[in-house]
């Protein structure tokens, strides 16, 4: 799919990527007391023991879909929101349901050279509009970085990671979500 972008659109996408990155970083921050010690795990991963994660704004506790992947990984999709800028943002939680640490499969990044060179991500995710017979890939910023959660490599047993993916908005209000190594799911798009 070839797209032409104007300078204004590129600036908007970069600003959106920065905002999304800040939001993802803030979501990974712990809410517990600060005793001055650094956590033994990445800030973006959290243990599910104790208080569970609260629902993000505009999301319900009931997921839109729960997908099973390889090596005990699961993806719980909590929202698929269309915005006025012509984008769809999918939010969810990646979890290691297994008994051992799991190296996140590189297949989740997809097979496009431009995305792979930017490290591990969920850049291999796609939305399929069955009526329009079109596939929508994760958006990229002007540097070729995917507009999705990046920079993760391992999840310990029981750990979760808040994730997001942003796509061009299909005209359909219901799409099929696909991520390599995971089962697929039909998602309603709100907004």
Image: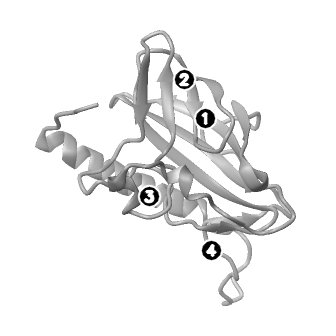
Disc 2 crowd, CA 10 A, few/some/many (<14, 14-19, 20+): few
Marks 1 and 2 sit apart, C-alpha to C-alpha, by 8 Å
Residue 53 visible in the displayed image: no
The nearer-to-camera label among 3 and 4 is 4
Among numbered discs 1 and 2, the one appearing first in the sequence: 1
* Most foreground residue, 75 or 181: 181
Secondary element at image label 1: strand
* Cβ–Cβ under 8 Å for marks 1 and 2: yes
Disc 1 crowd, CA 10 A, few/some/many (<14, 14-19, 20+): many
* Cβ–Cβ under 8 Å for marks 4 and 1: no
Marks 1 and 3 sit apart, C-alpha to C-alpha, by 17 Å
Residue at which label 4 appears: 42
Q: Position of residue 160 (x, y in %)?
A: 72, 59
* Cβ–Cβ under 8 Å for marks 2 and 4: no
Q: Which mark is residue 190?
A: 2
Q: Position of residue 188 (x, y in %)?
A: 60, 21
Q: Position of residue 120 (x, y in %)?
A: 50, 61
Residue at 38%, 49% (x, y): give it.
Answer: 112
Residue at which label 3 appears: 21
Among numbered discs 4 and 1, the one appearing first in the sequence: 4
Q: Position of residue 133 (x, y in %)?
A: 44, 15
Among numbered discs 2 and 4, the one appearing first in the sequence: 4
Horizontally, residue 188 falls left or right of residue 39, namely left
The nearer-to-camera label among 4 and 1 is 4
Horizontally, residue 115 falls left or right of residue 109, namely left
* Cβ–Cβ under 8 Å for marks 3 and 2: no
Horizontally, residue 191 falls left or right of residue 7, namely right
Among numbered discs 1 and 3, the one appearing first in the sequence: 3
Marks 2 and 4 sit apart, C-alpha to C-alpha, by 32 Å
Q: The N terminus is located in which quarter?
A: top left
Residue 26 visible in the displayed image: yes
Q: Which mark is residue 79?
A: 1
């Amino acid at each position: 799919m070839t797209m032409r972008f104007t300078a204004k659109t590129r600036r908007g996408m970069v600003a959106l990527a920065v905002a999304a990155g800040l939001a993802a970083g803030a979501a990974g921050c712990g809410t517990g007391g600060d005793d001055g010690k650094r956590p033994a795990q990445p800030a973006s991963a959290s243990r599910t023991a104790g208080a569970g994660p609260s629902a993000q704004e505009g999301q319900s506790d009931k997921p839109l879909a729960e997908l099973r992947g390889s090596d005990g990984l699961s993806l719980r999709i909590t929202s698929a929101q269309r915005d006025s800028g012509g984008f769809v943002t999918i939010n969810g939680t990646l979890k290691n349901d297994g008994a051992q640490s799991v190296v996140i499969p590189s297949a989740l990044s997809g097979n496009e050279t431009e995305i792979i060179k930017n490290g591990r991500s969920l850049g291999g995710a796609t939305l399929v509009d069955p009526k329009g017979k079109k596939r929508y890939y994760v958006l990229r910023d002007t540097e070729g970085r995917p507009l999705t959660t990046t920079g993760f490599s391992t999840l310990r047993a029981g750990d979760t990671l808040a994730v997001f993916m942003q796509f061009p908005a299909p005209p359909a209000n219901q799409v099929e979500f696909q991520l390599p190594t995971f089962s697929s799911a039909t998602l309603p798009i709100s907004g």
